[in-house]
Amino acid sequence: MIRGDNDPVLKNQDEFIATTAAEKTGKGYSNIKFLIAGIIFGIVLTKAQVISWFRIQEMFRFQSFHMYGVIGSAVGVGMLSVFLIKKFNIKTISGEKIEIPSKKFNKGQIFGGLIFGAGWALTGACPGPLYAQIGTGATVVIITLLSAIAGTWVYGRISQKLPH
Amino acid sequence: MSAFITQPWPWYIAGPLIGLMVPALLLLGNKSLGISSSLRHICAACFPSKIPFFRYNWRKEVWNLFFVLGILTGGAIAALFLTGSEPVQVAPALVADLAKYGIHDYSNLVPLDIINWHALFTIRGFLLMVAGGFLVGFGTRYAGGCTSGHAIMGLSNLQWPSLVATICFMTGGFVVANLILPWVLSL
């Protein structure tokens, strides 16, 4: 049985799949632009040292401003960008209206958030940095990534039994 | 200029560049920044196991897998061509704290003393890498996003559930880093 729109678990997933015109046409080589965007993002994450286990520990121990500065200024620039896109009704490069899905509150953001925070402090990495760390040559992080995939799978397996 | 490239970038350069990923992905193809979804797409593509949560058309989300492959490549480019040989600079207080647990190697962004293939087969390494990774995957999916999806994209779009999630990320991290990690490191 495939769960539909009435399912609270699927409905509340921020990335619940919506079919847009762009996705129907977004085939093949057009994904190269996302590969390039990812390369730039990976370089910035690495040069900012936000993929550093040490930097994450500094943040959680309030020993350095670095991570707070990075996240805070990233959010500031992101917020201003989204505001400008909405205010001037800016379109995508293919002329499509930009749509940002809203997030619905559920208890998963509390329980899941606390669990992820715990994992972030242990591994010193959130999902993006895991990929970047592997790229920098820390090959053992492949195991951490596989374990994160396993964690995602187990969540999917038991999600209906968890409070949301 | 080349000296600037090989130095670690300060927060006021790196943070705004990370923030610009939000409009970049929206303009390139109406995509919301988010990385933990890639873990779900990998599950859906490789091990769906008839689980409803993984029964969707992941091929429509394949851009996300290209994006994370790019992040991995970007990490390699930065490490190979854009990094000097100086050790990672961190707060002296942290150096003093970590020295108690035998962590002295600052040659890599990842602490090679405790995160390496050999350490994987110790209790400490297992907890740091395998258990920690599991919590990252389980927690991000349960929360519906990670630092990129909630803390950057969600907050940029003024989503209050993302603020709740971000506060919980920080709370969980704060508790574990200060109360649990010292015990794990001493194992």
Image (cartoon, coloured by chain):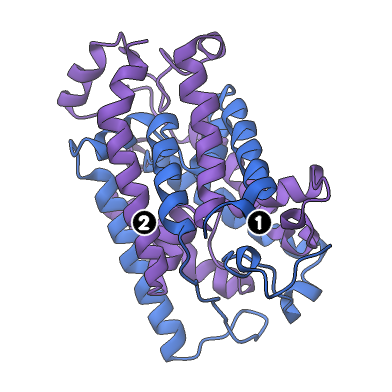
Q: Which residue is mark 1?
A: B64
Question: Which type of secondary structure does the marked residue at label 1 adopt?
Answer: helix
User: x%, y% of residue A111?
Assistant: 44, 50
Residues under numbered marks 2 and 1 in contact, where contact means CB atoms less than 8 Å apart: no
Q: Colour of chain A?
A: blue
Q: Nearer the viewer, residue A152 or A1?
A: A1
Residue type, numbered disc 2 = Thr
Q: Which residue is mark 2?
A: B166
Q: Is residue A87 visible?
A: yes
- Relative to B20, say whether B112 is above or below: above
Q: Chain of mark 1?
A: B
Residue sitting at x 44%, y 91%:
A88
In the picture, measured across the screen, residue A147 lies left or right of residue B154, that is right
> Looking at the figure, which quarter contains the N terminus of chain A?
bottom right
Query: Which corner quadrant of the image does residue B55 belong to?
Result: bottom right
Give the structural element (helix, strand or loop) at label 2: helix
**Looking at the image, residue B151 lies above or below residue A128:** below
Residue B26 on image: x %, y %: 55, 72
Q: Which chain is purple?
A: B
Left or right for B132, reference A35: left
The percent coordinates of residue A147 (x first, y second) are: 61, 32
Work out whether residue A23 or residue B82 is closer to the camera in this orientation and state it.
A23
- Cα separation between marks 2 and 1: 22 Å
Front disc: 2 or 1: 2
Residue drawn 59% across and 40% down? Answer: B72
Amino acid type shown at disc 1: Asn
Which chain letter goes with mark 2? B
